[in-house]
Image (cartoon, rainbow, N blue to C red):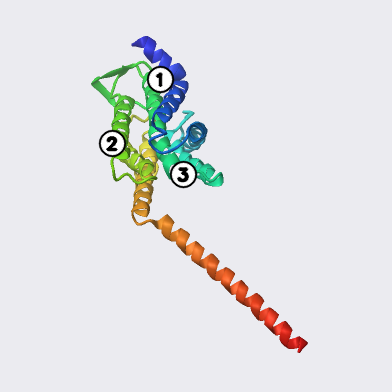
């Protein structure tokens, strides 16, 4: 157990990357993607996860520094939650790839990577919960504590199972899996935040009496609901039709203006 913990602590990032790639390779055909799309966007998603988590870690470090904390946060998962869909969808749209299927493939594969990241937190001694006699021993704080990362890891596995069931149902709509998994993660993460231990109690009340991560959870839930409603009501399809109509009207107006200009020129010649 200690050996497994040491490996996960030191190599969780790489284990997560391997897990992400393996899952993508197993499911990309389900989303009607080819191997090129699978490999390319798995790499894009993984790099986006790392970059987003790194940047959010810097932001959080700056925020808690303003509260008097000297703690350094290297990575924060919510940076990945927010940045990854933006970069994946944007990159897919730029090279004209089917982003709804791509982002759904990423939804499942990256959840595996994040789950392994939580195991890294568990064995690294960070992100744990309150002191609890019946809890697990935390060698950093040298006391028994509620193992929040373990329960977050289990929660992520449950979300993955739900995601697989959702994706393989008959009425699955491309583009709906990512907001579903994000909605579930945001809702459960909000709950698990109540169990978290904070060195500085002020960290628990940063935004409207909530921790920063609870606030991010609410934003994630809200955006996910908007995304799902947009898919249900086909906002993108309606927006596309609206843009096409406006472009047609503009082209028609320009055509009429040119025709009128030619007509006026003929009148002047006469």
Q: Are marks 2 and 3 in contact (CB under 8 Å)?
A: no
Q: Residues within 10 Å of mark 2 (few under 14, many from 20)?
A: few
Compared to residue 199, the image places residue 138 above or below, namely above
Compared with residue 238, is residue 166 higher up or lower down, i.e. above or below? Answer: above
Q: Nearer the viewer, residue 101 or 120?
A: 101
Reading the image, the residue beneath label 2 is 165
Q: Earlier in the sequence, mark 1 or mark 2?
A: 1
Q: Quadrant of the N terminus?
A: top left
Q: How many marks?
A: 3
Please report the residue visible at 38 percent of the width from the left and 48 percent of the height from the top: 223
**Based on the displayed image, in which of its 4 quarters is residue 255 positioned?**
bottom right
The answer to whether any part of residue 178 appears in the image is yes
Question: What crowding class fits label 3: few (fewer than 14 Cα within 10 Å), some (14-19), or many (20 or more)?
Answer: many
Question: Nearer the observer, disc 1 or disc 2?
Answer: 2
Tell me where residue 187 appears, x and y as whole percent: 30, 41
Task: Report x, y in % for residue 26.
Answer: 39, 28
Who is closer to the viewer here, 12 or 263?
263
Q: Between marks 2 and 3, how big is the CA–CA gap? A: 21 Å
Q: CA distance from mark 1 to mark 2?
A: 32 Å
Looking at the image, is mark 1 or mark 3 earlier in the sequence?
Answer: 3
Q: Quadrant of the C terminus?
A: bottom right
| Percent of width and height locating residue 217 | 36, 42
Tag shown at residue 124: 1
Question: Is the residue marked by circle 1 packed among few (<14), some (14-19), or many (20+) residues within 10 Å?
Answer: some
Q: Secondary structure at mark 2?
A: helix
Q: Residue at x 58, y 74 (%)?
A: 253
Query: Which residue appears farthest toward the right when viewing the image?
Result: 269
Which residue is label 3 attached to?
Answer: 99
The quarter of the displayed image where residue 137 is located: top left
Q: Is residue 67 visible?
A: no
Question: Label 3's element?
Answer: helix
């Amino acid at each position: 157990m200690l050996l497994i913990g040491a490996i996960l602590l030191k190599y969780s990032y790489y284990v997560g990357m391997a897990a992400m790639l393996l899952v993508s390779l197993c499911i990309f055909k389900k989303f009607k993607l080819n191997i090129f799309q699978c490999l390319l966007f798995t790499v894009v998603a993984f790099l986006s996860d790392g970059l987003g988590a790194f940047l959010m870690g810097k932001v959080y470090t700056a925020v808690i520094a303003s509260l008097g904390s000297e703690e350094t946060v290297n990575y924060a998962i919510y940076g990945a939650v927010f940045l990854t869909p933006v970069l994946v969808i944007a990159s897919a749209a730029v090279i004209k790839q089917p982003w709804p299927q791509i982002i759904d493939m990423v939804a499942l594969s990256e959840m595996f990577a994040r789950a392994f990241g939580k195991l890294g937190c568990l064995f690294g001694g960070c992100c744990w919960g309150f002191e609890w006699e019946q809890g697990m021993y935390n060698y950093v704080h040298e006391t028994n504590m509620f193992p929040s990362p373990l329960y977050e890891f289990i929660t992520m596995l449950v979300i993955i199972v739900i995601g697989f069931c959702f994706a393989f149902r008959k009425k699955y709509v491309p583009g709906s899996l990512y907001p579903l998994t994000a909605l579930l993660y945001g809702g459960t993460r909000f709950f698990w935040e109540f169990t978290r231990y904070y060195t500085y109690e002020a960290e628990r009340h940063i935004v409207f009496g909530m921790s920063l991560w609870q606030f991010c959870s609410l934003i994630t839930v809200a955006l996910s609901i908007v995304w799902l409603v947009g898919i249900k009501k086909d906002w993108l399809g309606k927006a596309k039709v609206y843009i096409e109509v406006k472009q047609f009207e503009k082209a028609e107006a320009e055509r009429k203006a040119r025709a009128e200009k030619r007509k006026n020129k003929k009148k002047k010649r006469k």
